[in-house]
Image (tube, helix red, strand yellow):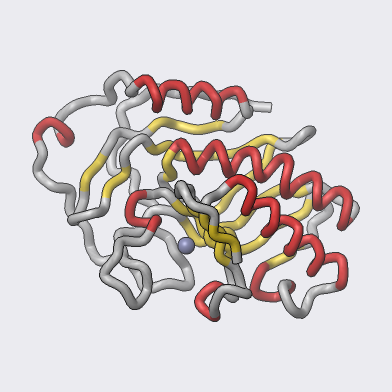
């Protein structure tokens, strides 16, 4: 298991990779000298505490410098996750850009205790990788003037799970049409996400979520 906590100055890490959604508008960093010219500085106490928790979860990650983009869009107190840990293995991640540390710790706990163990029990194999459609994306909630949780890197769109035995279970293909066990697995992991994230949206929410679970750290509790 890797346990990396790298404190490095970071440049230009902006992973807007929301596959099924409109591409993000071109973004330019605002000219805030205090933000754009400084090297990585000591994290706030709350962020530092969160980084310690994430490290204790055996995640491999890099803390990112705070950045401000268009109005309502920023990556503050974020990390770049390169892998997570299950009980026995390192879990790969695909397409994931910056995520807030709060989302990262919830995601790490869910991956290990919610997803990997459910895969073992229901499908007979742990997971090797979680595929996503990304995290940070400067955009509004579809059809509204309100910024999405993605605009502050506070949400992850999870699209599929690759098992250690090579099988791949995707939200799009298997939520309705998978085997009985695959369908049960997806519902169990959706349900367990609701215990760790304030907002979880999946295929039963609307057609826009037919191919992913939206996991967002909020103070609320909305699960559908
Ligand atoms: Zn989303």
**Which picture quadrant has residue 132?**
bottom right
Q: Is residue 191 above or below residue 32?
A: below
Q: Position of residue 90 (x, y in %)?
A: 69, 37
In this orientation, which residue lies closer to the viewer: 34 or 103? 103
Residue 211: quarter of image: bottom right
Which quarter of the image is occupied by the N terminus?
A: top right
Relative to residue 55, is residue 65 drawn left or right?
A: left
Number of numbered discs visible in the structure rendering: 0
Residue located at (73% from left, 63% from top) = 186
Residue 109 position (above or below residue 211): above
Percent x, y for residue 47? Answer: 40, 27
180 to the left or right of 103: right
Residue at 39 percent of width and 49 percent of height? 153
Q: Position of residue 63 (x, y in %)?
A: 40, 31
**Does residue 49 sit above or below 174 in this rendering?**
above
* Apparent side of residue 63 relative to residue 59 in the rendered image (left or right): left
| Quadrant of res 184 | bottom right
User: What residue is at 52 percent from the left and 56 percent from the top?
Assistant: 199
């Amino acid at each position: 298991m890797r346990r990396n906590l790298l404190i490095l100055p970071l440049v230009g890490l902006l992973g807007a990779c929301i596959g099924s959604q409109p591409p993000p508008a071109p973004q330019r960093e605002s000219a805030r000298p205090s933000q754009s010219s400084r090297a990585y500085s000591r994290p706030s106490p709350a962020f530092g505490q969160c980084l310690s928790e994430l490290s204790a979860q055996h995640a491999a990650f890099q803390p990112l410098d705070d950045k401000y983009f268009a109005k309502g869009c920023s990556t503050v107190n974020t990390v770049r996750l390169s892998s997570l840990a299950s009980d026995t293995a390192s879990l790969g991640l695909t397409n994931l850009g910056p995520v807030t540390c709060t989302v990262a710790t919830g995601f790490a706990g869910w991956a290990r205790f919610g997803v990997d163990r459910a895969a073992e029990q229901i499908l007979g194999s742990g997971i090797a990788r979680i595929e996503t459609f990304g995290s940070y994306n400067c955009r509004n909630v579809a059809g509204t003037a309100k910024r999405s949780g993605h605009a502050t890197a506070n949400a992850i769109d999870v699209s599929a799970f690759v098992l250690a035995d090579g099988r791949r279970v995707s939200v799009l293909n298997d939520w309705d049409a998978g085997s009985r066990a695959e369908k049960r697995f997806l519902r169990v992991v959706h349900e367990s996400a609701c215990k760790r994230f304030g907002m979880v949206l999946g295929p039963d929410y609307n057609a826009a979520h037919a191919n992913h679970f939206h996991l967002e750290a909020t103070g609320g509790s909305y699960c559908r």
